[in-house]
Image (tube, rainbow, N blue to C red):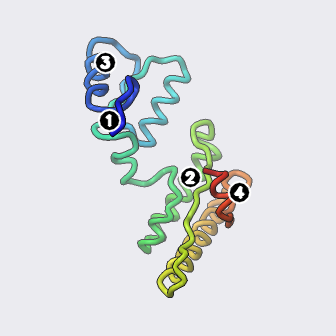
Amino acid sequence: MLDARPGDLNAASRARALAHITEHEVDVLVIGGGITGAGVALDAVTRGLSVALVEARDLASGTSGYSSKLVHGGLHYLAKGDVALAWESAVEREALLRRIAPHLVQSRAFLVPKFRDGGIRGRIEDALTEIGIRLADVLRALSRLPASVLPRPRRVDARAARLLA
């Protein structure tokens, strides 16, 4: 078990933080530490406002993670066969990255493992994953989000993956 440090997020630090904000006035109180709440808090702080953000559980664990996935690529929607929701996600992501909040949203590449299992299941999983990634990229292009803003998916070898990590 690791020893807790003073800045760690844990029950004791949460209690101290809650006690602190009940005794001090802030300009903005953000309720919810999902992508929306974190973005609002960041924007307010960068404007010089004092901000308190409260979250019932852990950061990025709440409703914005369960709703429209505004900054999310929608890949798991495709896996569930919900193309309409994946399309909505792509359109919203384009708006955020290019018009609404390009100063708050940054594109990030993600790595998808390739199964080493040479069996049929591993090959099927790899093929389905590849189809999903390519379909998500088609949705990106159809949303008019250029590859210069959100790069197209690419394969990397194990060495490159380690360097990215």
Give the number of the mark in front: 4 or 3: 3
Q: Identify which residue, 4 or 156, lies in the foreground.
A: 4
- Tell me if residue 162 comes above or below residue 17 in the rendering: below
Please report contact status of discs 1 and 3: CB closer than 8 Å, yes or no: no
Number of the label disc, if any, that sits on residue 55: 1
Q: Earlier in the sequence, mark 4 or mark 1?
A: 1
Q: Quadrant of residue 12?
A: top left
Per the image, the residue denoted by label 2 is 93
Spatial CA span between label 4 and label 3? 43 Å
Q: Amino acid at mark 1?
A: Glu
Number of the label disc, if any, that sits on residue 97: none
Q: Amino acid at mark 2?
A: Arg
Q: Earlier in the sequence, mark 3 or mark 2?
A: 3
Spatial CA span between label 3 and label 2? 33 Å
Q: Amino acid at mark 3?
A: Ile
Q: Quadrant of residue 91?
A: bottom right
Rendered-image quadrant of the N terminus: top left
